[in-house]
Image (spheres, rainbow, N blue to C red):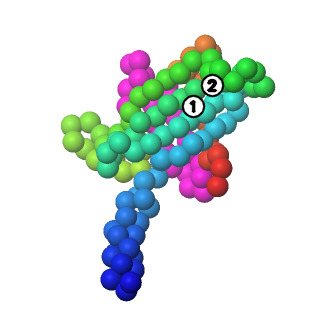
Amino acid sequence: MRRVLTITAATAALATPAVAADRFTGYYNRECGTRHVCDLRIEQTEPTTWKVVWEPFIYRGDGRPVCRKEFEVRIGGPAGVFVDGIAHRRLGGRLVGIVDRGMGRLEVRAEGQGCRRIAMGGTYDAVGD
């Protein structure tokens, strides 16, 4: 029994730093205009890469997204320059960046609109616990 407990504790200790280093994974949303709410779901795919799904919905609508953008963001910079704390990519020729603001908040900075005159950029709050 003691051996099982030791192995479990060692495994938990190894897993904890990876979880703590992941600043972006989660489910977030925000009001994006007077008629829409925007959902942002992010999951880590590699140590410095995240899959992002952005969907705006009509506030109190039918529950179907108005549009959907799926893309990956990565921490880093041009020509191997490492930029810590900002995950980014070009989406449709325009730059999108995600910054961890702490306390369950992310800031999305986006050049231009997300879709149908709905802005992707803004501060998103974590949903749930």
* Residue 48 in the image, given as x and y percentages of width and height: 33, 46
Q: Nearer the viewer, residue 40 or 11?
A: 11
Q: Is residue 37 above or below residue 27?
A: above
- Residue farthest toward the bottom in the current orientation of the protein: 2
Query: On the rendered structure, is 21 left or right of 69?
Result: left
| Quarter of the image where one finds residue 87 | top left
Contact between marks 1 and 2 (CB within 8 A): the answer is no
Identify the residue shown where x is 53% and y is 37%.
41
* Residue 129 in the image, given as x and y percentages of width and height: 64, 55
Identify the residue shown where x is 39% and y is 70%.
12
The residue indicated by pointer 2 is 56
Q: Secondary structure at mark 1?
A: loop
Identify the residue shown where x is 47% and y is 47%.
24
Q: Nearer the viewer, residue 95 or 54?
A: 54
Residue range corresponding to the magenta coloring: 89-111
- Can residue 52 be found in the magenta stretch? no
Q: Is residue 21 above or below residue 86?
A: below
Q: Nearer the viewer, mark 1 or mark 2?
A: 2
- Residue farthest toward the left in the current orientation of the protein: 79
Identify the residue shown where x is 61% and y is 13%.
116
The residue indicated by pointer 1 is 121
Check disc 1 and give the amino acid type: Gly
Label 2 crowding class (10 Å Cα cut-off): few <14, some 14-19, many 20+?
many
Q: Is residue 17 above or below residue 87?
A: below
User: Does residue 34 appear anywhere in the picture?
Assistant: no
